[in-house]
Image (cartoon, helix red, strand yellow):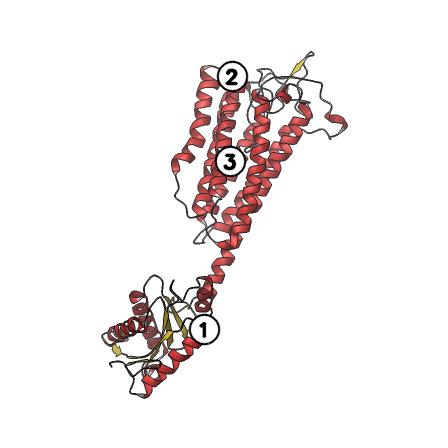
């Protein structure tokens, strides 16, 4: 039987542990138990000895070799870290996944440090690495979820996840050696991490992933309850702490920690894939050339925002079409035509209000929906766009291309549908073309000033 130093922490957020004495056995113990004269004292989790009845789990559970289980979990988490790093690489919103990957990697290192057999003189160093890697892993998980959720980082909370275990090591490993207090100090930091993670999951960044966030909140809440139960037993705060059998405690908490980390890894992957799918759906609703909404995106945005009407039900729509666009393509080429479309898209984006919906409906036809706007406001906006385009020159291969627009405006009645309002604005636009182009017509009204 080999004599080693103070106990280290086993799991990621469950500090499923070894005995805390200075002479614990690490050889030939299938369940990491320690043989002592009756009565036996053991915490069942992280190392403080506490009175308990003889273990009877052999009749219900297969023998569990805790260090081997920890090493297996470490390897699994390092592989998951690589997968998350690969999934998040090269994506606009992959920084959260990268931080999760670092968290799983550090957690795996923490587990490896627990499962390693080291000489007695290296025991304190391995213990310190175990605790600090665990705290750093929690900080990375928390920062990753805040980055993914587009929340403020609040780095001080993440630093706290590392500072508390570090303070515990200084106090209870080196200054006043006390394995029980050291483990409980790190456990306190882990419980704070679970609370901070629960708070970070309150508001998903997109409605498409709300279901995953909701299930993650339930997972964290359940695990936090198991975690609190386990360490309340170690601290002697619950009446059951004196009667809990070591085998049951160790097995149940080890399984809970394993399931929590597996579920967390699956949730991180699911979130990343769900966000990529949502991003692809966004791209399917955006015109690739101008960066404006396309026809599908325009109608989708109008439905989701209820978005083409103001609070009082008022709304106006503008339809715009580039005059003689085919002539531009024939004379200067399609690349020049694309540049003209991009220039018009830029002008519309510059002049749009935050609540406006601006889209390229197809070809050289564009649309602006103005929630809360009356006909006079829509006419003024259309004239402003026409004036900007008259003053715009597009340079292509040394040629200076100028273009004009025809516009139609419709103020929608409170009961009028978007399709009907667009049809009336479209009719007004074609009336403006027939009247000579480079002008604005309003549906049901006389021509506006050209």
Q: Which residue is mark 1?
A: 417
Q: On the rendered structure, is 363 left or right of 44?
A: left
Q: CA distance from mark 1 to mark 3?
A: 49 Å
Q: Which residue is mark 3?
A: 194
Residue 131 x, y percent position in the rendering: 50, 28
In the current view of this chain or complex, which residue is farthest to the right? 59
Foreground pick, 40 / 450: 450
Foreground pick, 303 / 1: 303
Report whether residue 369 is seen.
no
Residue 304 x, y percent position in the rendering: 46, 62
Residue drawn at x 42%, y 64% is 307
Q: Earlier in the sequence, mark 1 or mark 2?
A: 2
Q: Which one is in front in this view, the residue at disc 1 or the one at disc 3? A: 1
Residue 121 x, y percent position in the rendering: 52, 18
Residue drawn at x 49%, y 15% is 177
User: How many residues crowd mark 3 within 10 Å: few (<14), some (14–19), many (20+)?
Assistant: many
Displayed quadrant of residue 75 = top right
Indicate whether 335 appears above or below 60: below
Q: Are marks 1 and 2 in contact (CB under 8 Å)?
A: no
Q: Which residue is mark 2?
A: 178
Report whether residue 444 is seen.
yes
Q: Earlier in the sequence, mark 1 or mark 3?
A: 3
Q: CA distance from mark 1 to mark 2?
A: 73 Å
Q: Which one is in front in this view, the residue at disc 3 or the one at disc 2? A: 3
Q: On the rendered structure, is 105 left or right of 230?
A: left
For mark 3, give the secondary structure.
Answer: helix
Picture quarter with the C terminus: bottom left
């Amino acid at each position: 039987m080999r004599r080693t130093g103070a106990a280290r922490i086993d799991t990621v957020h469950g500090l499923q542990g070894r005995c805390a004495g200075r002479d614990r056995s690490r050889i030939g113990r299938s369940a990491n138990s320690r043989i002592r004269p009756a009565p036996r004292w053991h915490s069942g989790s992280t190392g403080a000895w506490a009175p308990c009845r003889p273990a009877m789990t052999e009749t219900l559970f297969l023998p569990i070799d805790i260090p081997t289980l920890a090493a297996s979990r470490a390897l699994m988490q390092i592989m998951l870290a690589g997968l998350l790093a690969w999934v998040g690489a090269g994506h606009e919103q992959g920084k959260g996944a990268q931080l999760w990957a670092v968290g799983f990697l550090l957690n795996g290192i923490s587990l490896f440090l627990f499962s390693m057999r080291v000489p007695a003189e290296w025991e304190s160093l391995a213990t310190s690495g175990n605790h600090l890697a665990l705290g750093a892993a929690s900080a990375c998980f928390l920062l990753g979820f805040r980055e993914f959720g587009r929340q403020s980082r609040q780095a001080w909370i993440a630093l706290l996840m590392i500072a508390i275990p570090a303070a515990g090591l200084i106090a209870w490993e080196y200054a006043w050696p006390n394995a029980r207090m050291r483990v409980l100090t790190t456990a306190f930091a882990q419980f704070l991490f679970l609370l901070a993670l629960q708070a970070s999951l309150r508001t998903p960044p997109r409605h498409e992933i709300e279901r995953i966030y909701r299930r993650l909140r339930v997972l964290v809440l359940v695990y936090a309850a198991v975690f609190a139960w386990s360490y309340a037993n170690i601290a002697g705060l619950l009446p059951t702490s004196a009667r809990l059998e070591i085998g049951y405690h160790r097995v149940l908490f080890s399984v809970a920690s394993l399931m929590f980390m597996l579920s967390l890894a699956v949730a991180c992957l699911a979130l990343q894939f769900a966000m990529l799918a949502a991003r692809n759906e966004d791209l399917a609703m955006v015109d690739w050339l101008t960066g404006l909404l396309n026809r599908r995106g325009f109608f989708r945005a109008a439905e989701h925002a209820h978005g083409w009407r103001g609070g009082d039900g008022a709304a106006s729509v503008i339809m715009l079409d580039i005059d003689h666009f085919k002539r531009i393509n024939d004379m200067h080429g399609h690349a020049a035509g694309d540049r003209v479309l991009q220039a018009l898209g830029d002008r519309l984006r510059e002049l749009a209000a935050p609540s406006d919906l601006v889209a390229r409906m197809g070809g050289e036809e564009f649309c602006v929906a103005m929630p809360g706007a009356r006909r006079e406001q829509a006419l003024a906006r259309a004239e402003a766009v026409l004036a900007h385009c008259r003053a715009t020159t597009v340079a292509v291969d040394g040629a200076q291309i100028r273009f004009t627009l025809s516009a139609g405006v419709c103020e929608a009645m409170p009961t009028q549908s978007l399709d009907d309002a667009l049809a009336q604005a479209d009719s007004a636009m074609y009336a403006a073309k027939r009247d000579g182009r480079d002008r604005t017509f309003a549906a049901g009204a006389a021509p506006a000033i050209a």
